[in-house]
Image: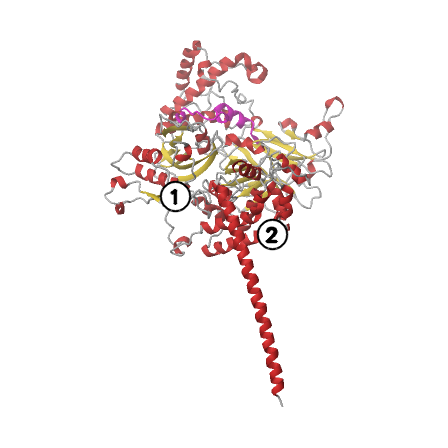
Amino acid sequence: MSANERLCDYFAVVGPKEADLENRVVQEDYSIGNLHRALEEAIVDICIVDHPREVIPFEKNYELLLKPEQVEEGLGEGGKLQLAKHRYICFRRRKHRRTTSYITEVRVVCKSQESPPQGFELIEKTVGGASGDLSRSGSQQVYLAVRYAHVDETSFQFSIPPVLADLCLCSDEKGGSAPMEYTVLPRPLSRLGLPNENIYLAYQQGPSAGLCDIPYEAYSLDWFPHEATYEDFPLPQNELPMFCFPKGVVLKHQKRNDAPMPSYFSFVFTSIDGDRVHVACLQFYELLPDRVLRALEAKQRILTVLGAFASGENPTESGGPISLGEWDRDEESVASSVDEEEEESVEAVSSTSGQAAGVATGIPKASPSTQQSPGRRAATNHSGLISLKCKERALSKSISTGTELPRQSALTGVPVFKSFKPAGRSDHALFAPKCICIISHWPFYRALRSFLQQIYRISLSPSRVPLERYIAYFTHYMPLPPPGQHVLNLHLDLGMQDRIENSTLAPITLHLPDTRSLPLMDLDYEAPFRCLSLDNVLKIFVLLLMEERLLFMSSSTSLLTEVTETILTLLFPLEWTSCYIPRLPNKLTEILDAPGSFLIGIYIEGTTDSWVLPQLSDPLFVVDLDHDCIIDAENKDYTTVMENMPILEALREKLRTELDRTGVTVKSAEALREGDSAFELPAVPGSQVEDGPAMKLELNVDIVRDAFLVFMCELLGSYTRYFNSQQAQLDDTDACDMAHNGVFGAFDVSGFLASAEKTTKALLVRVLLTQMFAALVQQRTDHGRGIDRLVFFETCVEELKERKDAEAAASTAAATAHAASVRGHCAIGLAVDNESAICLP
């Protein structure tokens, strides 16, 4: 049985491995060594210097922020930097000033037009006390604003804001001279460059170091069928975890009796054969054992004790930052000859509880020259590695056993926590997310969601039937419904009931439409209209017709796939052939910089307010589903193709009428996130939902899809008349471009455009340049009328034409009859008047 003949392909469980959590097996960027280096390089101070009136504080280890071209232009004789008369930004890193606070975000604020964002502090003065205004004229009052994060070194923190890793300047808001991973702030810093040149500030954020900020790796833990995988579609074991957890597995720390609620989402990925594979997921949280929490706390405190957040005014007084050059090497790389010495060192450190600082520990120490000279670290890396691993084991043992280390630690030479005893949070615990997934080549989204909901409910309830039996029945033995036949209702718990009426679970509805009809899409077509206005839905529809680059973003996990899938079906008979990833994993973000069209969705955890578009080589359109807006990265006037188009206005009116009938309106971001719940929650007493109408009118899917089908028939209806076997002459540049798409050889582009309505020609030219239309022509040329969906579309075109002809004939006949009636009335009236005139004396 092929993939297209199966209802489902696999059932899978995806999540982290408990052993990985306990041993802190994390992604490379979040290893203890890399986190330590990132925290050492974190920016903790930013200041403004009015040069040459004020002296740049190089002696306080501040760095000067300059553009590359400013450095080249300012180099004088002997390579000495000659600075022009400008205001300069200087910053200092944490390795040069020990502090428990650091900068996590930076913004450019126009004080005359807006207030600083909540939680931000303005840098209103220069180092000499002058105004920190960076605007060229001074009338706009442009200032830098920074947000600080404070770390409490006397308590364990599960969530820590990310550090500000670096700053740079660039000449344009598109970040032409900024690295790709940097974010460019949209407002310019005028007075930092040449008198008539705008300069933009770009920044790079580092990783978050909190225990519940660190992403762990996810794996395909189990699946069915497990032993006999399908030859035509092997289980994507490596890809599935990446899409289920696009940002990695992130733990949650909550009360034991308040576990996070299960959520639902779906996504689509493309198989090796080019087929789209649809995946429905239900995510739930499992309580982790206390030993895992203690082990993770031990590992996390090591990062803190190793100087990450240790306080002290001068790093040289506390021994300087600890070298972690060899921290991330495997323990097997350490020579076995030093194992005994290492164990003795651990015991010695653990026995120092309550002693004064500076007690000999037996740990091999690097010489002062090694600490001060990076060039000499290689000679003592082996000894340094032993030292670091001794520190890790000693600290782990101290935390797990409840013993104390000295206040002035001999391990690091810097102040540490007062107590390393376990926090004893008996009322709190760690929860790890897992996903149960159902994989299918058919977009039965609502049916698959119902199945996952019922499987989860059954798993929490006593059942005479093993849970595996339900999974095997649905995924392996359940047949695909015949196309165009009756609706199939599946009662999953029927085996435990005597009669259907006794079933406590709602039936899972399966229906496959006829092959000569609109394609299957078992989704809620209200989704686009719950987060986008009608005008924005139509704009996105037109942008997709022109195969633009679109990036959707939302803080709702379920909304991205629902919106993109439903809108793509409205393109019928065209099929989106470009890159399509409605839920983009972090590991694939480089694809945003790939050439060509794409439709990509990004899940933004929390809110999209703070998300800033990364710098890309090619512009794109960003659709913010949380705030119902379309951000045009290149300021294209794409609305010109939508102006004065009667068929588009007719589509708008049909949709407006249906939306008004059902009362579907755009909802807030918070309300949209409520739709991510795996189960429908009862309305809050006294809420608008509870006090609203008892029966909610549902959007008629047939009316919505039919309205867009009529539009596509009007736009492309006559295309079948222009297939030819002989190549015609190329009349214009557009036709030449279409020849490169493979359209021109079998299609008379010039004739088709000449026959089009003036109002649709601008849009039609863009559509004919797309890969979608090229694929349509190729399919029609290769298979003729052998493709059912094309037969259905062309039948609709013919019926629509006949209906319009009949309406036109009826209108003509009515007009003729009306004109004759008017003439008759006029004639009768004249006769009456004449007769009356004759009868008068």
Q: Which residues are magenta?
A: 20-43
Mark 1, Cα crowd under 10 Å, few <14 / some 14-19 / many 20+, is some
Q: What residue is pinned by disc 2? A: 645
* Within-10-Å neighbours for mark 2: few <14, some 14–19, many 20+: some
> Front-most of 837 and 625?
837
Asked if the magenta segment contains residue 35, the reply would be yes
Magenta stretch contains residue 704:
no
Asked which secondary structure carries label 2, the reply is loop
Circles 1, 2 touching at the beta carbon (< 8 Å):
no
- Residue type, mark 1 in image: His
Helix, strand or loop at label 1? It is loop
User: Residue 502, relative to residue 240: is it above or below?
Assistant: below
- Position of residue 639 measured from the top left corner of the image (x, y, whole percent): 61, 48
Give the quadrant of residue 286.
top left
Residue beneath the point at 51% across and 20% down: 324
Whether residue 62 can be seen here: yes
Residue 377 placed where, x, y %?
A: 55, 15
Residue indicated by mark 1: 511
| Colour scheme in use | secondary structure
- The mark that comes first in sequence, 1 or 2, is 1
Query: From what the image shows, is residue 661 above or below residue 184?
Result: below
State the CA–CA distance, disc 1 to disc 2. 36 Å
At horizontal 63% and vertical 51% (from top left) the residue drawn is 759
Q: Name the foreground residue: 328 vs 318.
A: 328
